[in-house]
């Protein structure tokens, strides 16, 4: 995929950008950049697929509620995760025009994309990129969210039918907040790591 347009537009919005042909190259880069620091993750299939918890965990202090260590509970991990040096997540949609879109249910992931860290890293596979903001929002709602609902095993109409968002009123609705980064947030450095492979949902 040609990243020229999205790279230019992200940079104009104040984001640092790096781009890689493969997930392996991106993982090597992140392991070189993040060393001897504290790191936390938003729940992310992209980061899981890249094995980043395991590789970064060899030389950093990790906090992930998907990997709760012995002696801690998930709430303690989440509290530590909200203030550590580096926060890694992906995007549910990235517009070529530069807006980064995420939908969340618990809120830890989107809140950490906005505040509390020295640096936020969005790791984004080529499948997450759509030409316009409206199309990126559509993908976040109709592709990413239903697949996440299926992964979580909830009984929402999107998970049952597996085709689109129904803007449901289900008590198990996973889509409870939407965050769009129009520009890089002032309080921390934000880097978008583009990967020319499909990753996550
Ligand atoms: S709002 Fe409901 S139907 Fe739509 S994606 Fe979220 S959980 Fe599924």
Image (cartoon, rainbow, N blue to C red):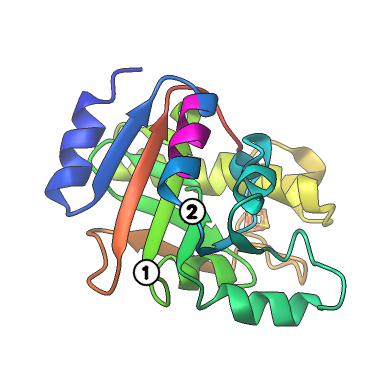
Above or below for 90 versus 118? above
Labels in figure, total: 2
Query: Residue drawn 79% across and 66% down?
Result: 68
The x and y percentages for residue 27 are 52, 35
Q: Is residue 161 left or right of residue 43?
A: right
SS of the residue at dot 1?
Answer: loop
Q: Is residue 98 left or right of residue 54?
A: left
Quadrant position of residue 109: bottom right
Above or below for 196 versus 156? above
Query: Residue drawn 46% across and 63% down?
Result: 86
Mark 1, residue position: 118
**Principal secondary structure, stretch drawn in magenta:** helix
Q: Nearer the viewer, residue 58 or 136?
A: 58
Res 165 visible: no
User: Disc 2 versus disc 1: distance between alpha carbons?
Assistant: 14 Å
Which stretch is magenta?
25-30
In this rendering, the label closer to the viewer, 2 or 1: 2
Mark 2, residue position: 35
């Amino acid at each position: 995929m040609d990243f020229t347009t999205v790279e230019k537009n992200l940079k104009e919005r104040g984001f640092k950008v790096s781009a890689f042909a493969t997930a392996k190259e991106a993982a090597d880069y992140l392991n070189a950049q993040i060393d001897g620091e504290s790191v936390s993750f938003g729940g992310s299939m992209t980061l899981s697929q890249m094995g980043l918890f395991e590789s970064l965990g060899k030389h950093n202090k990790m906090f992930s509620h998907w990997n709760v260590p012995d002696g801690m509970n998930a709430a303690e991990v989440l509290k530590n995760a909200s203030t550590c040096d580096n926060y890694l997540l992906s995007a549910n949609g990235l517009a070529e025009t530069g807006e980064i879109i995420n939908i969340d249910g618990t809120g830890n992931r989107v809140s950490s994309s906005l505040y509390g860290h020295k640096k936020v890293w969005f790791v984004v596979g080529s499948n997450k990129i759509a030409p316009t903001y409206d199309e990126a929002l559509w993908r976040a709602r109709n592709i990413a969210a239903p697949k996440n609902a299926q992964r979580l095993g909830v009984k929402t109409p999107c998970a049952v039918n597996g085709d689109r968002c129904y803007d449901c009123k289900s008590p198990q609705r996973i889509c409870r907040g939407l965050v769009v980064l129009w520009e890089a947030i002032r309080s921390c450095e934000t880097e978008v790591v583009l990967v020319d492979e499909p990753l996550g949902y």
